[in-house]
Image: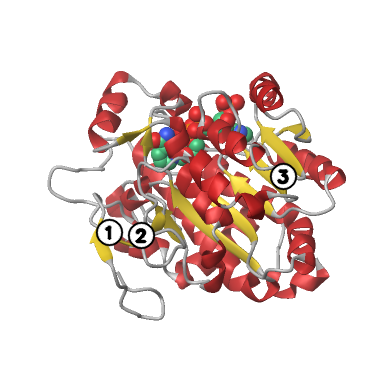
Amino acid sequence: MSNEKGNAMSDEKENPWGLKTDSNRTSNPGFNRETTATEVASTFSNVVRGKTVIVVGVSPKSLGESITLAFAANSPQLLVLASRTMSKIKAVATKVKEQYPNVQLQLVEVDLSSFASIREAATEINNLVDEIDILVNNAGVVVTDPRTTKDGLELQFGTNHIGIFLLTNLLMPKILEAAQKSQSKGSTRIINMTSAGHLISPIRFSDYNFKKRPEEIPEDERPMSRPGASFDPPPGKTYVPFVAYGQSKTGNILMALSISQKLASEGVRSIATHPGSIWTDMSRNLDEEHRNIIEKTGDFWKNQDQGGATTLVAALDPKLAEDKDIIYLADCQVAGCAPWASDPKAAARLWELSEEIVGQKFDLGQASNL
Ligand SMILES: NC(=O)c1ccc[n+]([C@@H]2O[C@H](COP(=O)([O-])OP(=O)(O)OC[C@H]3O[C@@H](n4cnc5c(N)ncnc54)[C@H](OP(=O)(O)O)[C@@H]3O)[C@@H](O)[C@H]2O)c1
């Protein structure tokens, strides 16, 4: 892989998806797929101390739980846990309180598949915090049948990208507040959980709601195709669940790219992370056929704590502040991603489309006026 400046990377290795990783661009070349979130957070304990951290998507057995526990172990000033189901957030909060009784917690309910809920939750969070140092957008959903959000969008794109886009932008003034106060430029971070599944699909700008067959959309919007992996819909159908998931996860990376470009000079960095393969509650909506497909995709299955590690590196490693061109991490190291997920033009186009969909402009070029 080369980065956007075209620099050749040193110490390159190929990961299982045929993309290069480079262990020279983080502080800890020794971190790898076996490293745990607990270990990463304790390595960067001084970075966590005193910070206000928001984790979005928090449930028992999810990566949101291991990520939350790793932050909690290192004395943040405040942890805000925001997710869809209050009883599940409370179950994780109870675990945190048992292990780290001094940690300040705030719990917020938000349904990322509803603009109204996102706007309400953003107001609540903005009233709870003075600033936001680290925002971890972990929430995500996988489904195998066509469903829509409350606002009529395809569910995975609408929740995993559009929902995250709206929530993040509504919290942006508090993120910029943290960046302004921070002594170390680039330590204010927005981390989007993506997936190697982004390799399945670019953004279907002309058909993000899956109303058309692949042959009816431009060639550069069609899903990945290679021998043995067809993502074509069955005859007469237009929806392919993993393509819709892939599109949403490409959105997570393009959004990180846009934010890093727009806000690097303000001291905000955004990075997308692929956590690896972990059996979590994510598979709850999968039928047997789709579970079988997923089972075959992982060559190494991580436990929950290992699954949170890459996100903790992205959120905390001071070395990542130096290079705004880093947009994607996998197995705790900087990695390459699909060309359609690292294209600044696609990022700008998606930003505009997302603004259009949510009905609000977020001109981060005018960040100081937000
Ligand atoms: N597990 C893997 O192997 C894997 C691989 C690649 C990428 N990822 C990514 O990692 C992230 C975490 O996934 P996970 O494996 O931990 O899955 P998970 O156990 O299903 O957790 C997903 C979290 O997102 C929340 N969520 C789902 N829909 C939501 C909505 N509409 N509004 C608010 N919150 C919502 C869930 O809350 P509820 O429980 O209340 O629904 C849950 O807390 C996802 O972004 C996923 O795409 C996971």
CB atoms of marks 1 and 2 within 8 Å: yes
Q: Amino acid at mark 2?
A: Cys
Residue farthest to the left, as pictured: 227
Q: Amino acid at mark 3?
A: Pro
Indicate the quadrant containing the N terminus: top left, top right, bottom left or bottom right.
Answer: bottom left
Foreground disc of the pair 3, 1: 3
| Residue 297 image position (x, y, % from top left) | 26, 37
Per the model, the C-alpha gap separating discs 3 and 1 is: 34 Å
Per the model, the C-alpha gap separating discs 1 and 2 is: 7 Å
Circle 3 SS class: loop
Foreground disc of the pair 3, 2: 3
Residue under pointer 2: 337
Q: Nearer the viewer, residue 139 or 37?
A: 37
Q: Is residue 63 visible?
A: yes
Q: Height in image: 243 above or below 190? A: above
Which mark identifies residue 19? 1
| Residue 136 image position (x, y, % from top left) | 60, 47
Q: Nearer the viewer, residue 198 or 297?
A: 297
